[in-house]
Amino acid sequence: MKQTLYLSVLSVILLLTLGCIFMPSVRGDGNVITQTIDITNFDEIDVQGSSIIFNYSQQESVPTLTVTVDQNIYDLFEFKTDGEKLVIRPKERGKKQIRFRPTEFTITTHSSSLKKADMSGIKVFNLNGKFASGEKVEFNTAGSTIIELRDTVTVDQMEIGTAGKCTLNADALYARVLKGEIAGKGTFNLKGVGEKAEFEIAGMGKVHAFDYELSTLSCEIAGKGTIETYTKDKISAEIAGMGTVKYKGDPTVNVDKAGLGSVKKVD
C-alpha cells in the first residue's frame, strides 16, 4: 500500500485540527462587489482560499474571470494568470494562514482547455457544460470540496486526488483510464463508462460506481473504505483492515487481504 496515502491522512487530520484551533479569521464586511479581471488563456488552475464557489466551463472564446466577494476580502487576494496557470490566492502567503469568512465568494471563468486543478479551500467546484479532452485531466483537493461534473465529461485519462472530506459527483463520465485516491472520508459518486480504473483509499473513503461500467478495476484499501463497482472482465484488490469491495458483473477476481476485509458479488 502506498505510504503517501497514509501520510496524507495524518497530514490532513493534523492540519485541520491545528487550523481550527490556531488559525485567525477575516470576516467579510458585507460590501459585496463584482469585479471582472483581464486574464490570458490557461489550462491549469491553482486556487487557495475559503468558502469559494468556483464555476468553470470549457469555451473557445477569450477567457474571462469574474469575482464576487466582500471588498475587504477581495483586497487581500491576488487574481492573475502566470504562464498557462490561473492563480487565485491570498497576497500575504509568507504570514500565518488566515481563514476567510466571506458573505459570498463566487469565481466564474472559462478557457479552451483544462489539464489540472489544484484546489484548497474551495467549497464547490462546478464544471459547467460539456467537457472534452484527449489528454490527462487532474484534480487535487484538500478539505471539504464538492466537485460537480453534472454534464457529459469525455477524457482520455482522469486523475483525482482528495484529502479530507471531499465529494466527487460525476453523472456522465467517459474516461478511458480513471485513477482516484481518497485520503480520509472522501466519496466518489460515479456514472458513465470507462475501460480501466484504479482506486486507492486510506481511511473511510467510499466509491459508489455501480453505474460506472468498467472492463478492469485495480484497487487498494487501507482502513474501512468501501468500493462498489460494475466491472466486466477483471478485478484486482488489495485490502488491509476492514475494507469492502462489492461488485456487479462476472469478472475474474484476485484478492490479497490482511484483516477482515471482503470482496463479494451483489445482485
Image (cartoon, rainbow, N blue to C red):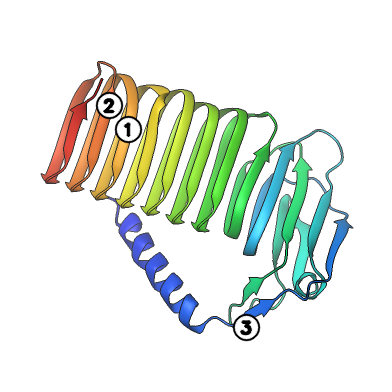
Name the residue carrying label 3. Answer: 95
Q: Does residue 216 appear to the left or right of 138 in the view shown?
A: left
Contact flag, marks 2 and 3 (Cβ < 8 Å): no
Contact flag, marks 1 and 2 (Cβ < 8 Å): yes
Q: CA distance from mark 1 to mark 2?
A: 6 Å
- Picture coordinates of residue 162 (x, y %)? 46, 52
Name the residue carrying label 1. Answer: 228
Evaluate whether residue 142 shows in this view: yes
Measuring 38% from the left and 54% from the top, which residue is drawn there?
183
Who is closer to the viewer here, 13 or 257? Answer: 13
Q: Does residue 153 appear to the left or right of 209 in the view shown?
A: right
- Picture coordinates of residue 262 (x, y %)? 16, 37
Provide the secondary structure element on which disc 2 rests: strand
- Picture coordinates of residue 9 (x, y %)? 35, 61
Quarter of the image with the C terminus in it: top left
Name the residue carrying label 2. Answer: 247
Q: CA distance from mark 2 to mark 3?
A: 48 Å
Q: Nearer the viewer, mark 3 or mark 1?
A: 1
Badge 1: few (under 14), some or many (20 or more) residues near its Cα, within 10 Å?
A: many
Measuring 54% from the left and 30% from the top, which residue is drawn there?
171
Who is closer to the viewer here, 119 or 136? Answer: 119
Provide the secondary structure element on which disc 3 rests: loop
146 relative to 217, above or below: below
Provide the secondary structure element on which disc 1 rests: strand
Numbered label attached to residue 86: none
Measuring 16% from the left and 42% from the top, which residue is drawn there?
261
Query: What type is the residue that disc 3 sits on?
Result: Lys
Q: Does residue 78 appear to the left or right of 187 in the view shown?
A: right
Measuring 20% from the left and 43% from the top, which residue is drawn there?
239
Query: What type is the residue that disc 1 sits on?
Result: Glu
Ranked by sequence position, the earlier of labels 3 and 1 is 3
Who is closer to the viewer here, 75 or 118? Answer: 75
